[in-house]
Amino acid sequence: MFHSNSIPPGGANRGRLKDTLVDQLIAQAEQETDLKKQAQLYRQLQQRLNKLLSYIYLLYEDNIAFYRDNIKDYRVSVDGNYDGLITAQKLKGSNKQGSNKK
């Protein structure tokens, strides 16, 4: 959520942080297969974020969608907003309960 590429609408970087070192540490940690090395990279990232940010989110919500057979054109937004409801439509004549999917 702190990568420069995650600034909305491309993601959840709502504070719009742009930092080359943060981006590099995130990329390196995501590709590291050695867990000890990965943990060290994330520690470095946390230290960098602690220096840069005036606040840190204490809550990061997942965006979960439940679908029904009588709803169409709903799309989960990558930045966690509810814009997907703009295109959602309830099909007429259908009261059938759909299955819940994550």
Image (cartoon, rainbow, N blue to C red):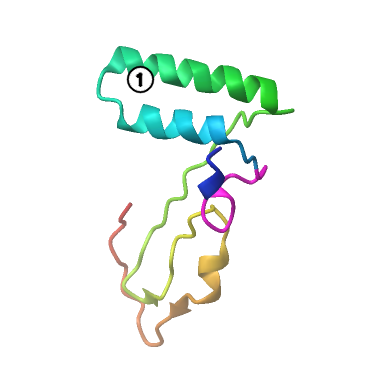
Q: Is residue 13 magenta?
A: yes
| Closer-to-camera residue (60/29) | 29
How many numbered marks does the figure carry?
1
What residue appears at the point 31 percent right and 32 percent down from the top-left corner? 31
Tell which residue pokes out farthest to the left in this image. Answer: 33
What residue appears at the point 34 percent right and 15 percent down from the top-left corner? 37
Mark 1, residues whose alpha carbon is within 10 Å: few (<14), some, or many (≥20)? some
What residue appears at the point 56 percent right and 44 percent down from the top-left corner? 4
Q: Is residue 82 above or below residue 64?
A: below
| Closer-to-camera residue (97/41) | 41
Position of 14 compared to 64: left or right?
right
| Majority SS type along the magenta span | loop
The answer to which image quadrant residue 42 occupies is top left
Q: Is residue 76 above or below residue 45?
A: below
Q: Is residue 74 magenta?
A: no
Percent x, y for residue 54? 74, 28
The answer to which image quadrant residue 101 occupies is bottom left
What residue appears at the point 67 percent right and 42 percent down from the top-left corner? 15
| Closer-to-camera residue (54/63) | 54
Tell which residue pokes out farthest to the right in this image. Answer: 54
| Residue at image mark 1 | 38
Tell which residue pokes out farthest to the bottom in this image. Answer: 93
Position of 68 compared to 90: left or right?
left
Percent x, y for residue 60? 54, 37
Give the magenta-colored segment's residue range. 6-16
Percent x, y for residue 22? 54, 31
Q: Amino acid at mark 1?
A: Gln
> What is the secondary structure assignment of the residue under circle 1?
helix
Percent x, y for residue 99? 28, 61
| Closer-to-camera residue (88/23) | 23
Position of 69 compared to 7: left or right?
left
